[in-house]
């Protein structure tokens, strides 16, 4: 994306708003009719005509400068997510460190899925040094509990979830670097917003089977990351 400024990216997803309504911008909490309350670094002046924009698909309104500031706070991957309704513009990617995702079939059934075999996914991510997309660039990060083993039923729906997880992996959305809510350790590899089942025949941690809603929950969580059924077919 060389040559594309943050302003260019934001503009691409916006429609012009000639006379802003008498409402506040929910990013900076200042009136849309006045200037952006965001005075962060790299936020230059904009002309009055383009100071407020409407996100083209969901219709939510923000100060142009507020959206640029929000974009600059993220990983600047060319995508934008509406902070109100979470609609994603472009292709959202994450900051998952380099590693490996593998899977295979195991000839045993999961509790709650007696009629099929199972899929085991194996994630492996080694420790490393944080990049510019991570919370503390240049600082090492740890990686605990790898390889991490996860399970899905080898059913039609389970295979669909697997397909979409492979897309999520390519987009670096399965893990991120941050503070583990389980251990409290910072600068470590943690699960991102897509739940995985890491127990096979038991459910001691709450991350096991049976769990009748699991596959639908994961599909919802993937959708929230911008990954839908179409993605599994085209990529
Ligand atoms: N299995 C699957 N998901 C888990 C687990 C687990 N054992 N523990 C937590 N999660 C989910 C949480 O419900 C939350 O949504 O991961 C998300 C992030 O939780 P963190 O504790 O911040 O993540 P992390 O440190 O990566 O995971 C904790 O999971 O797989 C194990 O070895 C791993 O012991 C580690 C534990
Ligand atoms: Zn604003």
Image: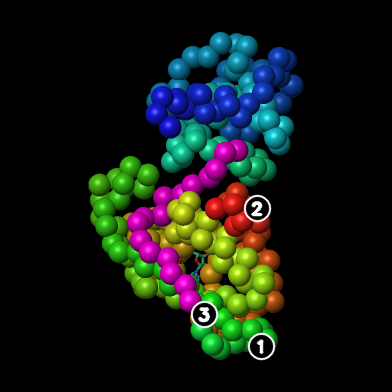
Q: Residues within 10 Å of mark 2 (few under 14, many from 20)?
A: few
What is the secondary structure assignment of the residue under circle 3? strand
Residue corresponding to mark 3: 105
Mark 1 sits near ligand 1, with its Cβ under 8 Å away = no
The answer to whether residue 184 is visible is no
Q: CA distance from mark 1 to mark 3?
A: 15 Å
Residue 48 spot, x, y in % from top left: 60, 11
Residue 86 spot, x, y in % from top left: 63, 44
Residue corresponding to mark 2: 230
Q: Which labelled disc corresponds to residue 82?
A: none
Among numbered discs 1 and 3, the one appearing first in the sequence: 3
Residue 101: say if magenta.
Answer: yes
Residue 41 spot, x, y in % from top left: 40, 25
In the image, is 222 to the left or to the right of 120? right
Q: Nearer the viewer, residue 139 or 30?
A: 139
Magenta part of the protein: which range?
Answer: 89-105
């Amino acid at each position: 994306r060389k040559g594309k400024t943050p302003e260019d990216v934001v503009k691409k997803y916006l429609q012009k708003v000639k006379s802003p309504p008498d409402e506040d911008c929910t990013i900076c909490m200042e009136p849309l009719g006045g200037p952006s309350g965001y005075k962060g670094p790299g936020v230059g002046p904009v002309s009055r005509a383009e100071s407020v924009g409407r996100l083209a698909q969901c219709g939510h309104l923000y100060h142009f400068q507020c959206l640029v500031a929000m974009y600059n706070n993220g990983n600047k991957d060319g995508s934008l997510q509406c902070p109100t309704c979470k609609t994603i513009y472009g292709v959202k990617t994450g900051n998952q460190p380099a590693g490996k995702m593998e899977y295979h079939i195991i000839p045993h059934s999961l509790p709650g899925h007696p009629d099929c075999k199972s899929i085991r996914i194996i994630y492996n991510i080694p420790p490393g040094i944080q990049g510019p997309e991570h919370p503390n660039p240049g600082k090492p990060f740890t990686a605990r509990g790898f390889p991490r083993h996860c399970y899905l039923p080898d059913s039609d729906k389970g295979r669909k979830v697997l397909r979409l997880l492979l897309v999520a992996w390519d987009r670096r959305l399965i893990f991120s670097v941050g503070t583990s809510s389980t251990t409290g350790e910072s600068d470590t590899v943690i699960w991102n917003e897509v739940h995985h089942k890491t127990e096979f025949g038991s459910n001691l941690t709450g991350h096991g089977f049976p769990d009748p809603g699991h596959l639908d929950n994961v599909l919802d969580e993937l959708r929230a990351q911008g990954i839908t059924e179409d993605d599994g077919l085209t990529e």
